[in-house]
Amino acid sequence: MSNEGKKNIFARFFGAIWRWIKRHKVLSVILVLLIALIIYVVNVVNKAKELLNNNSFDFATVETKDLTNSVSATGKIVGLDKKNAQAGITGVEFTEINVEVGDYVEAGQVIAILDSSDIQENIDIAKKQLNASEANNSIGVNGAARNLNNAEVNRDKDAEKADVNIARAWDAYVNAANAAKEATDKYNNAVNARKSAEEKRNAQVSNINGLQSAATDQWSQQFGTQMQELKDYLISKGFTDSNAGYVAISNYNVKTFTNCTLKASEFETAITDTNDSHYGEFLLKGVSDLWPDTGALDEDDALAINQLMSAMRDTSVAYVTNVTSASSNLATAETALASAQSTEAALKSAMDAADSTADSLWNSYNDMIRAKEDTRRMDDSTVATAADSLNTTRNTAAVSNLPSKQNIENLEEQLEKCTVTAPMSGTVTAVNFKKGDKYDGVTPIIVVEDESAYQVSAEIDEYDISKIEIGQAVQIRTNGTGDLELEGKVVSIAPHATTLPASMGAAASSANVTYNILIDILTPNNDIKMDMTAKIVIITDRKEKCKCIPIDAFQEEEESGRFYVEIYDPTDPTKMTVTEDGKIEYEKLYVEKGMESDYYAEVISNDLAEGTQIVIPSEYDNSMYDLTMEFN
């Protein structure tokens, strides 16, 4: 079809439309507005897509990868070991230098000798002085030991002597105690004898008192009866109480009738000394032959009276005889009592004396024990003092020569230091002295290095040193080996800083504090040389095949502190919602954060699959608000 034909077709098409519009004006207006609305909505949606595709929102994909953390630094190649040979002595000349730079030496090989003549002379003098001092100390120690031995011997002798004295004192006390007991027994027997004598004496006193008691004594009663019979007879013969004989008879009792002096004239007044030869005699001695003729009494009467009075006399004599016997017994009892009392008193004195002797000997025995204890304490004190003196002497002897011994040891050490040996096997890389030079005690005499293997020596900043551990893997590159990456391992971390800040005594322009580390080179390479520059990467942490997202994709709830991510599904934009304040919110999923690297971090969740898109929050989170307002 020609262009002209095409133009006619379009003209007819638009003409038909125009005619339709003219016939349907209202419907045409509505249709135009609808088309305009559709065009606007399409424009808004495109603008929303444009906002989603620009920097207002960043998205990341969940990936499986290996995570590593590392610390980078620059160091240099050094030998496996490096040691300086030094002598530890100053101001002494070298008499020999036995090696040159480049020589290989074995550990312990003599590499230099220093002049030791003055040191040896000082050693000889010091040893002589020490020997003399030790001899003097030995004399003092031996003397103190003898004093201690003498003190111990004296202590033992004093104890033995005290034991003998105590044994003797005990024997004396035992004998005295036995004597006291014997004296006490005798005294007790004497007391019992005295009590028995008192009882006998008291019995005799009671007997006499009974005999002398007229009311109860049998003889008094009998005599009274006989007296009454005589009185009754006299009364029967005409006598009355006025008759002298009757009265005289009444005045006698059983105690006195034995000595009765009654006369015949007291019964018959007619009897005189001229007509009666018995005048004045006791009536009981006979009967007057004149009474029957001259008086009222006949011979029978006189005989009767005489019989009655004879009976009374017998009773009185019996009484007096018993009283006399009782008195004699009482006197004997009194004598026995006095003797018993005297014996008791004597034995009491003997007992008291024996008790006093026993007490004295008991006290003496205890005094002996206390004396032994006192002597023992004094002897122990003497022994202790002697022991202390011996210990002090020994200690003094032990320490008095310590300075001399130490001086000799120091001199001998200096003598040993005059022979300098190689500190290790290796190559001599520096010789700093020659024969005749004086050693300054600071500069290494030689330097020996082990070139059989190499290490990297590097300084790590104080902010990173805490991440470094023995055994961590290291990636090594050097200028001499180009891009070849060598493997290494951290084998040493310095405990103290290498470079100190100015505040800690370093120069004012000092850098940050650093710590030296050593790294073994595990990959052999012949191109490595000493002092080459080495760039190292120390792997401080590694985790393989873990789900990872950018660290910025993790978000944290303010209230709970939990981590979450927002999931974006590009196939379903309607899953995102707009809040009242215009913020866009995506589907939220709580997760845990694992190992972190510089940019990525491990995300831990069973609900998050590899390939899922995650929202990375940005400063354009509110862009949808403006878009929504425009749409409204």
Image (cartoon, grey):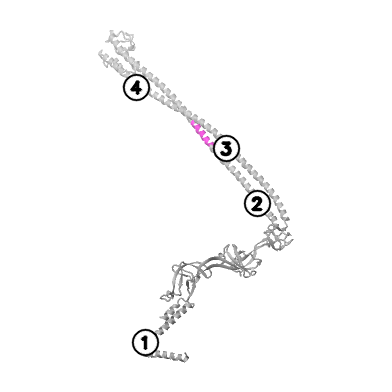
Identify whether 27 is placed above or below 313. Answer: below
State the image coordinates of residue 621 (x, y, percent, origin top left): 46, 76
Magenta residues? Answer: 353-368
| Residue 366 shown in magenta | yes
Of the pair 483 and 629, the residue shown nearer to us:
483
Foreground of the two, 354 or 284: 354
Q: Disc 1 residue type?
A: Leu
- Residue furthest to the front in view is 1
Q: Is residue 67 left or right of residue 7?
A: right
Residue marked by disc 3:
159
Precedes in sequence: disc 1 or disc 3: 1
Predominant secondary structure, magenta span? helix
Neighbour tally class for label 4: few under 14, some 14-19, many 20 plus, Cα within 10 Å: some
| Discs 4/3, front | 3
Q: In this figure, which residue is indicated by the disc labeled 2?
A: 402
Q: Residue 196, percent across and down?
A: 41, 25
N-terminal of the pair, mark 2 or mark 4, is: 4
Q: Identify the residue under disc 4.
A: 210
Residue kind at label 3, given as amino acid type: Ala
Left or right: where 113 falls relative to 457: right
Please say if the residues under marks 1 and 3 sit with CB atoms less than 8 Å apart.
no
Secondary structure type for disc 2: helix
Q: CA distance from mark 1 to mark 3?
A: 149 Å
Q: Nearer the viewer, mark 3 or mark 2?
A: 2
The quarter of the displayed image where residue 535 is located = bottom right
N-terminal of the pair, mark 1 or mark 2, is 1
Question: Residue shown at 68%/53% (left/top)?
Answer: 408
